[in-house]
Amino acid sequence: MAKVLKRSKKTRKNIPEGIISINASLNNTHIVVSDKEGQVLTWATGGSSGFKGAREATPYAAQITSEGAVAKAKTLHGMEKAVVYVKGIGAGREQAVRGIVNSGVELTAIYDITPVPHNGCRKKKIRKL
């Protein structure tokens, strides 16, 4: 018989500093809040915040999503400071950062980690509609 791994119950940790990762794609915005070691505390996407379809890609959806994820991290884990990593070219990049600032978390640094090719692979051909 296979051994069943038992998960520990979620405990309320006191984490004053953390990492907030924003992935702003063309279709959605993902927000992941983690501690300094990279263990995920909370996350949110445009769909989990109540937006569906094309509205997930809007700047307003990104702001609401980031406010919700950070508010959850503040109440459950007591997060006060954070480092923000922004990746992607979506419309919600700046608004997601504004949502974090509006939720009351102090930002210590903002990094842009969008992958930029240095003439590596050949690009896809242009889509013709």
Image (cartoon, rainbow, N blue to C red):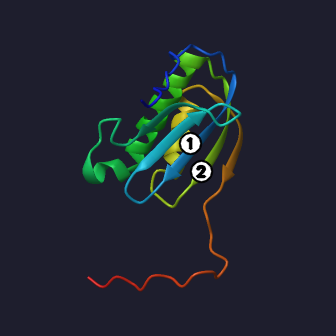
* Amino acid at dot 2: Val
- Specify the farthest residue to the front: 1
Asked whether, in this view, residue 15 is left or right of residue 27, the answer is right
Q: Tell me how far mark 1 sits from mark 2, CA to CA.
A: 9 Å
Q: Nearer the viewer, residue 121 or 21?
A: 121
Q: Position of residue 67 (x, y in %)?
A: 48, 32
Mark 1: which secondary structure? helix
Residue that badge 1 annotates: 97
Q: Quarter of the image containing the C terminus?
A: bottom left
Is 108 located above or below residue 26 in the figure?
above
Is 5 located above or below residue 25 in the figure?
above
Residue 127: name its quadrant. bottom left
* Amino acid at dot 1: Val
**Residue drawn at (53%, 58%) of the image:** 88
Q: Quarter of the image containing the N terminus?
A: top left
Q: Position of residue 23 (x, y in %)?
A: 51, 51
Please tell me the numbered disc located at residue 86.
2
**Residue drawn at (39%, 84%) of the image:** 126
